[in-house]
Amino acid sequence: MANVEMLTNGQFQAVYNVLSLALAAMGATTIFLLVVQARVLPRYRVAVVVSAMVCLIAAYHYFRIFNSFSDAYVAIEAGAPGVQDSYQLVKGVGFNEGYRYVDWLLTVPLLLFETIAVLALPRAVRSSLLWKLIPASALMIILGFPGEITNEIAPKAVWGALSTIPFIYILYVLFVELSRAAKSQPNQVGKELAGLRWLLLATWGVYPISYMFPMFGLDGADSFVYRQIGYSVADVLAKCLFGLLIYKIARIKSFDDDPAFEAQETKDIPVKKADASA
């Protein structure tokens, strides 16, 4: 997709700030998940560590996106000296949106992997689900990229339709096949798993909506800003909040598997009384 030539000061600041927010959220969640991964049983730590990896990969790409956006536009002073009224695209530089697709190509399969890993399903069931989900997720991202970078409506519609096929298949596996495989999970885990799936559906739904903006005649600076905000907020929810829910499920599973571990983790810490002679 061609870069927008001009942004108002408000539009530039909105994109700048949401990219900064996403970068901070990804970095902070990475640190948190790495610190708390020891608070679950070893068999569930892989899922928590992979969640941290997802946020770390996203943090790196948001760092690149943030720098690319900052370098792509230069402030134009209007009126009084020092008053920045608008930002113009620097010729020969451009804003590189491709970083998002590289990020998604790496993180979307990992998101699905951690969803399966945290449930500790039998090996055969786990392998079957992963062999269905991971190739489909990679194919979904790869097929969507040509449509993202074209300005022509017909090719965009074709690539968008092709990308939708693996997307629907992923939803089928998550909502139908995974439901069958997870029937033996504790009730609370079943509720959290349902939340994970609906969170993925809600956040992933932002991407095709933004993708289709030009097909609905929504283009220009406003469309660019809405797309960047939508992508960034959806990424934070689909990676940071998703990772925290994975950690919550890992805790529930750990407590269900080992009552002694639960007692150790939830026991009250005695409060030291102040020395009366002090």
Image (spheres, rainbow, N blue to C red):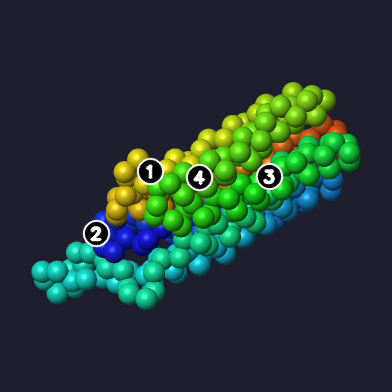
Tag shown at residue 8: 2
The residue to which callout 1 is attached is 215
Instruction: Identify which amino acid the numbered label 2 is placed on.
Output: Thr
Mark closer to the chain start, 2 or 3: 2
Mark closer to the chain start, 3 or 1: 3
Give the foreground label among 1 and 2.
1
Category of crowding for the residue at label 3, using alpha-carbon neighbours closer than 10 angstroms: few (below 14), some (14–19), many (at least 20): many
Give the foreground label among 2 and 4.
4
* Foreground pick, 37 / 116: 116
Q: CA distance from mark 4 to mark 1?
A: 12 Å
Mark closer to the chain start, 1 or 2: 2
Residue 135 screen position, x and y as percent: 71, 48
Instruction: Identify which amino acid the numbered label 1 is placed on.
Output: Met
Is 177 rendered above or below residue 60? above
On the question of residue 275 being in view, the answer is: no
Q: CA distance from mark 4 to mark 3?
A: 18 Å
| Left or right of residue 83: residue 238 | right
Describe the element under mark 2 as helix, strand or loop. Answer: strand
Category of crowding for the residue at label 1, using alpha-carbon neighbours closer than 10 angstroms: few (below 14), some (14–19), many (at least 20): some
Q: CA distance from mark 2 to mark 3?
A: 40 Å
The residue to which callout 4 is attached is 158
Do callouts 2 and 3 mark residues in contact (Cβ within 8 Å)? no
Mark closer to the chain start, 4 or 3: 3
Describe the element under mark 4 as helix, strand or loop. Answer: helix
Q: Residue at 44% of width from left, 68% of height from top?
A: 68
